[in-house]
Amino acid sequence: MTFSLRTIIDQDIPFVEGIEKEAFPTLWPRTPIKRDMHNKRIAYLVVTDLDQNPRINHLTNPMESPGESPNLYKRFSKTIQSKLFHQAPPRQTPFEMPLGFVSIWFLSDDAHITAIAVSNSWRGHGLGELLMIGSIESAISRNSRVVTLEVRISNSTAISLYQKYGFKKIGIRKAYYNDNREDAVIMTTEPIRSLSYEHRFSALCHEYSQRYYELGLALTNSNGSMPSIGLR
Ligand SMILES: CC(C)(COP(=O)(O)OP(=O)(O)OC[C@H]1O[C@@H](n2cnc3c(N)ncnc32)[C@H](O)[C@@H]1OP(=O)(O)O)[C@@H](O)C(=O)NCCC(=O)NCCS
C-alpha cells in the first residue's frame, strides 16, 4: 500500500462527508465542506491509498496549484525524501478515494485544526499521524505561530496523538459539545517555528518515515519532489 496526502478536490466531498459522519455521528449541522474548501483561510487535506483501483479519471492534475511553495517538507532530510517521495504522477491522475481528512482554519497567527478523522477500518495504520504531519507543515508554510484545537475530554486516542506532536492542555471549555454536554480540552503547540519545536517535529517526521516506509507510505506531488499539501 502507498498512502499519499493531498488537498481536497470536488470528487472527494462525498467520501469526506462519509468519514465525518462515521467519526462524528452526532455532529449537526454537518460541515459545509463544499463551501469551506473554497475559503482561502481553510485547508482540507485528505489521505488516500495510491494503489486503489482508479475510480474516476480527471483530465488535469488536481495537485497542481499555481501558488505552490517549493519548500514544503524541507524538514525531511534528502535521504528521507528520496525514500518517501514518489515519482510524478501522470498528468491524467486517477482519483483515489480519501481514507481520512483534516480541516485547518488559519486565523490570525493560529492554525486551528477543526476536525481530523480516519475511516474506521483504516485506523491504527499511521494515517492520522500523516494528517497531523501535513497539518503542521501546512501551518508552517502559512507562517502560523501555533497550532491549536479542541478535543473531547474522553477522547484519549486523539489526545495521545496530539500529545505526541507536542500539544499541551491549556484550558477547558465546559459543556462544549451539544450532544452530551461533554467538556472540551483546549490544546496548543509551542511556537511551531521555534528551534525546539522544529527539532521535535523533524525527529517525529524521521521516526514516522522509518516506521512506515516499510508499509510503503509516500507523500507525493505533481513534480515528484515535494508534496503539495495545505496549499490553495
Ligand atoms: C484520532 C484518529 C484520527 C487517529 O488516527 P489513526 O490513523 O487511527 O492514528 P495513527 O495510527 O496515525 O496513530 C497515531 C497516534 O495516535 C494515537 N493512537 C492511535 N490509536 C490509538 C489507540 N487505539 N489508543 C491510544 N492511542 C492511539 C497514538 O498516540 C498513536 O501514536 P503511536 O502509534 O506512536 O502510539 C482516529 O482515531 C479517528 O479518526 N478517530 C475518530 C475521530 C476523532 O475522534 N477525531 C479527533 C477529534 S477531532
Image (cartoon, grey):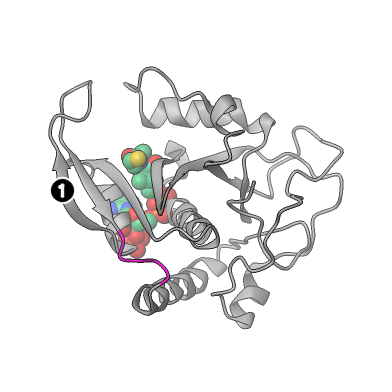
Residue 32 percent location from the top left of the image? 50, 23
Residue 150 appears in view = yes
| Magenta stretch holds residue 182 | no
Q: Amino acid at mark 1?
A: Gly
Residue depicted at 79% across the width and 60% down the height: 88
Residue depicted at 52% across the width and 70% down the height: 209
Quarter holding residue 25 = top left
Vertical side of 216 occupied by 45: above or below: above
Which region is colored magenta?
189-193
Residue depicted at 22% across the width and 22% down the height: 178
Residue 1 appears in view = no
Vertical side of 80 occupied by 174: above or below: above
Residue 10 percent location from the top left of the image? 67, 30
Q: Which residue is mark 1?
A: 171
Q: Residues within 10 Å of mark 1 (few under 14, many from 20)?
A: few
Quarter holding residue 185 = top left
Disc tally is 1
Residue 89 percent location from the top left of the image? 80, 55
| Magenta stretch holds residue 192 | yes
By secondary structure, the bulk of the magenta-drawn segment is best described as loop
Vertical side of 173 occupied by 202: above or below: below
Question: On the rendered structure, is 63 left or right of 58?
Answer: left
Question: On the rendered structure, is 63 left or right of 92?
Answer: left
Compare residues 225 and 119 and report the one nearer the observer: 225
Residue 177 percent location from the top left of the image? 22, 28
Question: On the rendered structure, is 151 left or right of 226?
Answer: left
